[in-house]
Image (spheres, rainbow, N blue to C red):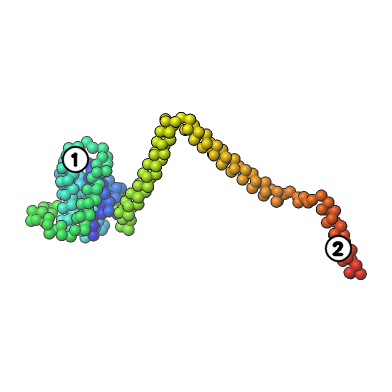
Amino acid sequence: MAILFAVVARGTTILAKHAWCGGNFLEVTEQILAKIPSENNKLTYSHGNYLFHYICQDRIVYLCITDDDFERSRAFSFLNEIKKRFQTTYGSRAQTALPYAMNSEFSSVLAAQLKHHSENKQVDKVVETQAQVDELKGIMVRNIDLVAQRGERLELLIDKTEHLVDSSVTFKTTSRNLARAMCMKNLKLTVIIIIAAMNPPLALSFLLLSLCHLHRDNWQQRERRRRNRFSSTSSSRLPVVGLPGQDVWRNKSRTILNREYEGTRI
């Protein structure tokens, strides 16, 4: 049981998101966001084995997707927490922000709170005051299929084996290696520029030497290709040429052998 996906959006404009596992979350979330009215509201949509919980306040939607056996109290505790943090951090800027404008900063907050509310089962004992229980009773659960338009298909596909923690580790490692390689490349370029500025003749010598090495390597490659073509052609098409007088000696040897063979037969 876990919170699978969380998103903060203004209408259908996504401002920040985080996924716990692989799935077509964005595709389904866009369909859900299009059905949420702009007035302040709290609601849970049900679809198959999943629940879509959301809080809409001041046109900003805080939504999460959970398994159907995940406690609704924990889901709305999570939404209230990210709503408080988002409003404190961004305030009115969220009303005019561009798509994904807060994602680089707030996605880490979503990830931390998502993990906390998914794994810490003691959250219920702390957050479930009587007021919150009463509030939860007033939040309706509605089947998403009832508000779907005719012919509209909403299908949530989730691959929990594709946990994004592994992907993020791989991505961070790749990014680190790429950054290191780019740093070394920039360092080499900087050294060359400094040498060129301080000693132009030396830089020119390095350049000419590099060109000579490049020309030599290209020439060697061409020679190797030419030899390979020549050897393959010679072995398949050209006759074998012997030393002077070698053919005469071969003919004499062949004649002697034939005579000895004929004498043996007689």
Q: Nearer the viewer, residue 252 or 262?
A: 252
| N-term mark: 2 or 1 | 1
Residue 145 location in percent, x, y? 25, 52
Q: Residue at x 12, y 55 (%)?
A: 127
Q: Nearer the viewer, residue 121 or 49?
A: 121
Q: Residue at x 50, y 33 (%)?
A: 205
Find disc 2 in the rendering and name its residue: 257
Residue at the right extreme, as displayed = 266
Residue 162 is left or right of residue 33, and the answer is right
**Up/down of 160 relative to 216, above or below:** below
Residue contact between numbered discs 2 and 1, judged by CB atoms under 8 Å: no
User: Can the viewer see residue 22?
Assistant: no
Q: Say which of marks 2 and 1 sits in front.
A: 2
Q: Quadrant of the rendered structure where residue 35 is? A: top left
Q: Residue at x 30, y 54 (%)?
A: 165
Number of other residues with Cα within 10 Å of mark 1, as a class: few under 14, some 14 to 19, many 20 or more:
few
Q: Nearer the viewer, residue 77 or 212?
A: 212
Q: Residue at x 37, y 41 (%)?
A: 183
User: What residue type is disc 2 on?
Assistant: Leu
Q: Secondary structure at mark 2?
A: helix
Number of other residues with Cα within 10 Å of mark 2, as a class: few under 14, some 14 to 19, many 20 or more:
few
Find disc 1 in the rendering and name its residue: 90
User: What residue type is disc 1 on?
Assistant: Tyr
Residue 105 location in percent, x, y? 24, 43
